Amino acid sequence: MDHSGHGMMMDLPPFTLGRGLEWSADPFFLVACAAGLALYGWGVVRLRRRGDAWPAGRTVSYVVGVLTIVLVMCTKLNDYGMVMFSVHMVQHMVISMLSPILILLGAPVTLALRALPAAGKGRKGPRELLLMLLHSRYMRVVTHPAFTIPLFIASLYALYFTPLFDFLMGSKTGHIAMMVHFLAVGVVFFWPIIGVDPGPHRPGHLMRMLELFAGMPFHAFFGIALMMASTPMVGTFEHPPASLGIDALSDQSSAGGIAWAFSEIPSVLVLIALLFQWYRSEQRQAKRKDRAADRDGDKELEAYNAYLASLSAREG
């Protein structure tokens, strides 16, 4: 496998966490993450200047989500991920499962819709184009579980167990495209499930939980398949550089363990978020019912008072 496009990659010393976290920025992801943070910050500032509130928790979640992408794509984790299956799997799991959840909990689409100015009558500005996209047939398809769940599963099996993975890892562009794909798949999979931002597919809370758990077992099976394999299954990582001092098969087994264990993390995170949303939704519904009951009670009282007034008028 030719890694010439990645500079000194073949001469990396044995992996340690300290070395992995050293700065080694990928320009594409660095610029994209900086732009994402700047735009979100602009939106929050715009709302605040207008006197509108924006939950601090959402801002924190979004910022941490973007920083997790920086962590795996702009440090030496990215360099080691080109030659070590286990480190690559950490990158994959973070960017496809942890980053999307945190970014979605930051509600960037809701922020954009509230912060972007409305275009004049008959014109289409960024806000109108975003609304058109949200209501488009394309969005209905790509956020539907019949599309997202098979895509989520195929991103593992169809990629790693075919020559496509080796082809993409052969160039810097291919590697970036693959990581962007992982992030996008994570976003469209978790978007309808988390349900903070508006979207065309909005199932009930129970259905969302079923959607979440429909994809996770396949993730676990993928990890187990890697752990139990008796030969290296991915060509890119078959002959790790001697300077790393690692065995390809044991590194693959570590990668499988990471994939298997990591599928639990988003499940717990999303489950907590869903239960919290469900509780909030029930509270809101209860308040609405109480208000309606109060209104009905007031109407009955008014009717009764009017009846008493009419009786006293007759008697008078």
Image: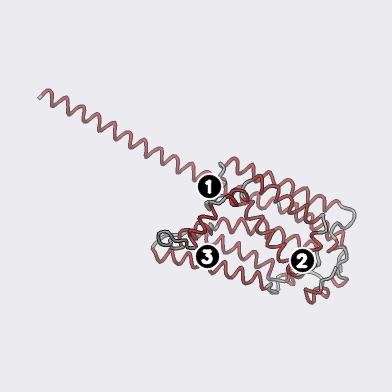
* Above or below, 280 relative to 93: above
Residue sitting at x 53%, y 47%: 277
Q: Nearer the viewer, mark 3 or mark 2?
A: 3
Mark earlier in primary sequence (2, 1): 2
The residue where tag 2 is placed is: 81
The quadrant in which residue 5 appears is bottom right
Give x and y (percent) for residue 193: 60, 48
Along the viewing direction, whichever of 172 and 66 lies nearer the viewer: 172
Give x and y (percent) for residue 316: 9, 25
* Above or below, 300 relative to 73: above
Mark earlier in primary sequence (3, 1): 3
Type of amino acid at the residue the image marks with label 2: Gly
**CA–CA distance in space, label 3 to label 2:** 29 Å
**CA–CA distance in space, label 2 to label 1:** 36 Å
The residue where tag 3 is placed is: 40
* Above or below, 111 relative to 149: below
Give x and y (percent) for residue 47: 43, 63
Local SS, label 1: helix
Type of amino acid at the residue the image marks with label 1: Gln
The residue where tag 1 is placed is: 277
- Callout 1 environment at 10 Å: few (<14), some (14 to 19), or many (20+)? some
